[in-house]
Amino acid sequence: MKRFYGYDSFRGKQLDVITAILQHRDVLAVMPTGAGKSICYQIPACAPSKDGAPALVLVITPLRALMRDQVSHLGSHGIPAAFIDSETTAADRGIIYQAAREGRIRLLYVAPERLPSPEFIRFAQSLRIRLIAVDEAHCVFQWGQDFRPDYLGIASFIEQLPERPVIAACTATATPAVRDGIVHNLQLQDPLQVVSSFDRPNLYFGRYEAHSKQDRTTRITQYAKAHRTESGIIYCTSRARTEELTEELRTAGVQAEYFHARMDEDRKAYVQDAFLGGAINVIVATTAFGMGVDKPDVRWVINDGMPGSLEEYYQEAGRAGRDGKPASCTLIWGRYEFDLLEQRIDESAGSALEDRERRLAKTAALERCQAMEDYCTTRSCLRAHMLRYFGEESVGRHCGACDCCTGNSGFAGATSTRDTPAVFGRTASFHVEHVEHSDEEQVIDTDLVQSVLHFIQAVHRKQGTGYSIVKIVNALHGSRSVSIVGSGLDRIEGYGSLADYSGTRIRAVIRLLMDDGRLVHGKQGIVLPASDEDDQ
């Protein structure tokens, strides 16, 4: 450790992982961003093999930026490493293969797409591989948002090797279900499961509910301008938004550059190097930026739009404060985003006659969407909420470093979540966000509430299942879409009964019913609480 990296000691659970690998035991290491996962498989590569013969550590990763950065970093520390990607020529691959056979390369980085290649299989069979490190191992989980089919070929690749190496699966975020999926799909043998705490005490978590696109832009610009001497990352949900927002920031005097997948490689490298070197302070990016990029002094991260899952959000937010100093993470969201996401899930899942895998994928997607919605709307500690999601018990009910525990939002002076009154008296007044994002006071009467409840009760009686908010709203509107007719919702009592009400009002009622506990978001969508189901 001291010789190659200059550190006197290991951090967290690094030593546990390294010891298990050196004792020839499979490992599943779940360690948050910035915890030093890469050292866990790089250090074993530096140790002599048991018989002194050349032995290779093969690192499988989907991240091209990580390949390049880590190979460069390892070389600067005197550790010979190489990578093979889609731009590596046949001649260069031959040179790398020969160097590995002769023991002149200790680590080789490849993408999972490389494994089925007959050329690569012949190479892998021609030498001893002591360890296979699977980076971003959550990509092997079939029902996850980041699932990559090529990861399912890792186990069969290993079976073709003359000697089974140790397998180390590494990821930054994984729920208990995802961890089980990793162990099963990679065929790990009695693995040591090392799960570091997901708690990042130096990070402040805030939310801001935006009422319009201009509201988002104004808040972000004001914040970035006030913190323009600090390093920050703004994540956007589209390439066009990164370019548009970058122009707004530049106009406000903020040194900003955009980054997305459609940029050419030279431009990407320039922007990344400028950010890492401090020439620019703010990156406005899609999720294409950040994986494998190590900049410890990022002081703030803003998500301009709701990520598809808490795993994705925690990874992006976790790029702040990797030096251990205080940093802030702010999520800007809008209620309409949930409906758009659920609609995309419905459309991609197909009809009610879909096969089992489609149903499972849809259920998993809806659960991720609901977890993200819960995070945006909860009135309890955000840190505790996230830790529970990842299967970790929090210490205490108040962290003192989130908008719920401090009473402050991610943006000073802004209201993070609005109080929502109960709706179960004769009438209740509250504010509803319209599609055009203007606030208009509406009065919801008991008839509207009961119509929604009766329809969902009827769905349960007839079909014993639940549906997304989007599907329920469309059915109550009387939609004749393929999705509605195919699922039989047009034959349920109450179908079309709220055609005169706006979708915004119906969605607001459903969410208020959920806040009150009269409805819950189950694995199949919006359903009655278990006690109410038993009474039907």
Image (spheres, helix red, strand yellow):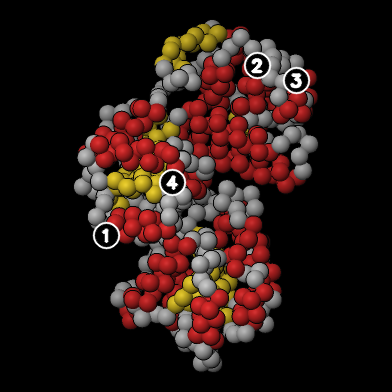
Q: Answer yes or no: do the residues labelled 1 and 2 have beta carbons within 8 Å?
A: no
The residue beneath circle 2 is 477
Q: Answer yes or no: do the residues labelled 3 and 2 have beta carbons within 8 Å?
A: no
Q: Distance between the residues labelled 1 and 2?
A: 55 Å
Q: From the viewer's perspective, is the residue at label 3 or at label 4 nearer?
A: 4
The residue beneath circle 4 is 286
Which amino acid, mark 3? Answer: Asp
Report which quarter residue 403 is drawn in: top left
Q: What element carries label 1?
A: helix
Q: Is mark 3 on a helix, strand or loop?
A: helix
Q: Nearer the viewer, residue 458 or 491?
A: 491
Q: Give the label on residue 277, or none.
A: 1
Q: Distance between the residues labelled 3 and 4?
A: 39 Å
Report which quarter residue 358 is drawn in: top right
The residue beneath circle 3 is 490
Q: Is mark 2 on a helix, strand or loop?
A: helix
Q: Answer yes or no: do the residues labelled 4 and 2 have beta carbons within 8 Å?
A: no
Q: What element carries label 4?
A: loop
User: Which of the marked residues, 3 or 2, is nearer the chain's N terminus?
Assistant: 2
Position in image of residue 493 (x %, y %): 75, 16
Q: Answer yes or no: do the residues labelled 1 and 3 have beta carbons within 8 Å?
A: no
Q: Answer yes or no: do the residues labelled 3 and 4 have beta carbons within 8 Å?
A: no
Which amino acid, mark 2? Answer: His
Question: Which residue does the image show at 62% across and 69% down from the upper left?
Answer: 115
User: Which of the marked residues, 1 or 3, is nearer the chain's N terminus?
Assistant: 1
Please rate how many residues cluster around mark 3, counting C-alpha atoms within 10 Å: few if below 14, some from 14 to 19, many from 20.
some
> Is residue 145 visible from the viewing direction of this image?
yes
Q: Is residue 28 above or below residue 56?
A: above
